[in-house]
Image (tube, helix red, strand yellow):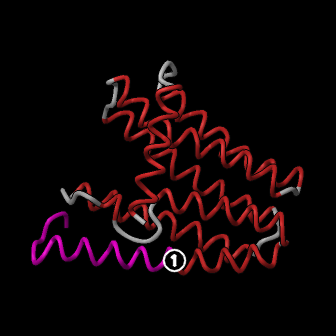
Amino acid sequence: MSSVRGRLRRLAELAARRAARLHPDALTLLGLLFAILTPLVAYLTGNPLYAALAASLSMLMDSLDGAVARIRGTASKRGAFLDSLTDRVSDAAIVLALHFLGCGYLLVYLVAVLSMAVSYVRARAESLGIGGMAEVGLMTREFRCLGLLSIYLLHYAFGVRVAEYALAAMLAALGATVVQRSLYVLRSLGNGTAGR
């Protein structure tokens, strides 16, 4: 898994060199725009492929903004906060689009909640001084994005029932990741009482 993550990040760094003339915040906001368009495209067209295209553009912008900030030497806490906030909204919008494509609302809701829980555990752990959270667990951000795009493509190729099975599998993997990350944080904190 870590080798796949490494390859994806290297690809993002290469693409970021090409996009380095753009401001990282502009890329962040473009990613948010494409994410918000994803459920609208799904609702208006009913076509999973078009929704996947909007979602993939959002994910591309998200993978570039941090890398561009590092290349330009403009990485900041402000940018990191904006990126984290827009990521949560983007995740919810991209998952919501699956409901407009016919996936059951309860399944979509649970995937959205657990996806945010995975991100929350990381953010809270980092606020407590625990590093390395980006690598902990099965469904890291890269794999959540790849998983969602795969579900859109499965929907297009095989229909809504197969997409729901894939969404249920993703739900189980997200649940496992919340447990993995929570156990990692609890072990890292030991018997401390930090953050209460």
Chief secondary structure of the magenta portion: helix
Measuring 85% from the left and 72% from the top, which residue is drawn there? 159
Question: Image check: 112 left or right of 69?
Answer: right
Eyeballing the image, is 7 above or below 194? above
Q: Which range of residues does the magenta coloring cover?
A: 173-196
Q: Quadrant of the N terminus?
A: bottom left
Amino acid type of the residue that numbered disc 1 sits on in the rendered structure: Ala
Judge by depth and name the residue closer to the eye, 65 or 126.
65
Measuring 47% from the left and 27% from the top, which residue is drawn there? 17
Question: Image check: 183 left or right of 51?
Answer: left
Eyeballing the image, is 10 above or below 173? above
- The percent position of residue 8, horizontal first and vertical second, equals 48, 50
The extreme right residue here reads: 45
Question: Image check: 15 left or right of 148?
Answer: left
The extreme left residue here reads: 192
Snapshot quadrant of residue 77 = top left
Question: Image check: 80 left or right of 166?
Answer: left
- The percent position of residue 115, horizontal first and vertical second, equals 51, 65
Q: Quadrant of the C terminus?
A: bottom left
Mark 1: which secondary structure?
helix
Looking at the image, how many numbered discs can be counted on the residues? 1
Eyeballing the image, is 51 above or below 1? above
- The percent position of residue 76, horizontal first and vertical second, equals 31, 31
Q: Is residue 11 magenta?
A: no
Q: Which residue is mark 1?
A: 173
Judge by depth and name the residue closer to the eye, 140 or 112.
140
Measuring 56% from the left and 34% from the top, which residue is drawn there? 29
Crowd around label 1: few <14 · some 14–19 · many ≥20 (10 Å): some
Measuring 51% from the left and 53% from the top, which residue is drawn there? 88
